[in-house]
Image (cartoon, grey):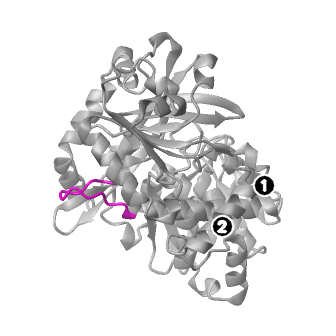
Amino acid sequence: MSNQTSIKQEADIVLIGAGIMSATLGAMLKTLQPDLTIEIFERLDVIAAESSDAMNNAGTGHSAFCELNYTPQLQDGTVDISKAIKIADQFEVSKEFWSYLIEKNLIESAESFISPVAHMSFVWGEENVEYLKKRHEALIKNHLFGGMEYSEDTELLKQWIPLVMEGRDPNEKVSATKMDLGTDVNFGSLTSSLFNYLKQQTGVNMHLRHDVTDIKRKGSNWVVKVKDLQNGGSRKITTKFVFVGAGGGALPLLQKSGIPESKGFGGFPVSGQWLVCTDQNIIKRHQAKVYGKASVGSPPMSVPHLDTRMINGTKALLFGPYAGFSTRFLKKGSLLDLFKSIKLNNIRPLLSAGIDNIPLTRYLISQVMQSQDDRVAALRDYYPNVKSEDWKLEYAGQRVQVIKKDPRRGGVLEFGTEVVTAADGSIAALLGASPGASTSVPIMIQLIERCFKNQVKTTEWQAKLKEMIPSYGESLSKNVELANATRERTSKVLKLV
């Protein structure tokens, strides 16, 4: 293709970004309506290289078994488990869709992306132990958390997590919960499998090294402008529906669309780093995802954990993530990303959220200034006998937390995911981070229901949705029999038992 070449084409669907969200939506839509034409554009030369990559924070199958930030303690001392129940329910739905893909031979084997790994919470100190006990008592009342064990017995904890217990003060008050149903998910591998399936389908085209530069409405359609970064050419695609699943790059593209729903949204970038173990003997001795309590003022993505992962078929051990601040919206983005995102319609929310979160900013700056000794000192809380030379620093992904308008405070910083859609459902963008990839399936189902309202009502789509997600239309968190039957089936298909 020469520099002067300009291509005009049409497509039913345009997916921007080659991560887990676009892959999931593309696979669902193509299954629901096989004759759809789909064009996929990714700025980088590989897929799943940003947030979906195994090292870029996405890795735990977030099911709220161990993440203490999903179960805050209220002022009256009770533990709020509502968010944990919602996330646990959502992760089960994700497993249903992945099981469907395996059963239909649409993607590679389950072992290529999901593994059983115990999910544990670990705390120390009288106050934290009391909190974890209350949390456990509250959670096990819901069947989604049935089987969760709790213990303050140091001898038992030595069996569960030897690295965490060895070298610890025997007089220190500690406790832990353990859920054997936990998983490790390599979302990079899953994303690759989904796109490999899509690329084999008629009417689907994947374009790497293609940067979407503009999105403009034209009547009832959208015109998406794309630059070929390898050959310098350009193309315009007229489409009925656009999904912006570009991770941290989603906000600037959403702003370019000009839809009223995009007004007032801003982004707060947070970077991450891991300490990665280099000693195979240490890696072999730890078999769990052990989460603790986050430091005061830290963002949820920075909840410390000693994390067993399977990365490209090899067992790994990570600790972190350590938070940091960068003005980039993507790991391979521009230092100008944050400044370019500031518009007249979001200045007030940005300033208000900034004033409200000065402690968070201080915390992030302090994290950036940490030395290797500082990071190892944090790890020592979870692995008392740690030796600095056994761990190396690796950079994780970039997250952009959502800032949105708030009638009372002007602007508020959100730590979840937000799907923004035009009133007519013709364009949608996913903003935010945690729990993100783990709940990609229910998020995309909600998007389909919002953006394809007429099609979803048809008998054909309803039947297909029930085939893909047998629990579709029902609540797993409220239906004990359905939840247990679903877990039994998906655990067998995904080889988690």
**Residue at 16 percent of width and 48 percent of height:** 355
Q: Name which residue type carries label 1.
A: Ile
Q: In this view, does 260 lie above or below 153?
A: below
Q: State the image coordinates of residue 296 (x, y, percent, origin top left).
A: 24, 40
| Percent of width and height locating residue 279 | 59, 16
- Image coordinates of residue 67 in percent, x first then y, are 42, 47
Dot 1 surroundings within 10 Å: few (below 14), some, or many (20 or more)?
Answer: many
- Magenta segment range? 71-82
Q: Mark 1 points at which residue?
A: 107
Residue 458 in sight from this viewpoint? yes
Residue visible at 35% across and 37% down in the picture = 123
Which of the pair 73/265 is nearer the observer?
73
* Secondary structure type for disc 2: helix
Reading the chain from its start, which is encountered first: label 1 or label 2? 1
Image side of residue 67 versus residue 18, left or right: left
Q: Quick check: 360 left or right of 335?
A: left
Neighbourhood count class around disc 2 (C-alpha, 10 Å): few under 14, some 14–19, many 20 upward: some
Asked if the magenta segment contains residue 382, the reply would be: no
The amino acid on which the numbered mark 2 sits, given as a three-letter code, is Thr
The chief SS type of the magenta part is: loop
Q: Name the residue under label 2.
A: 486
Relative to 161, say whether 101 is above or below: below
Which residue occupies the foreground of this view, 417 or 154? 154
Tell me which residue sits at (35%, 22%) in the image: 170
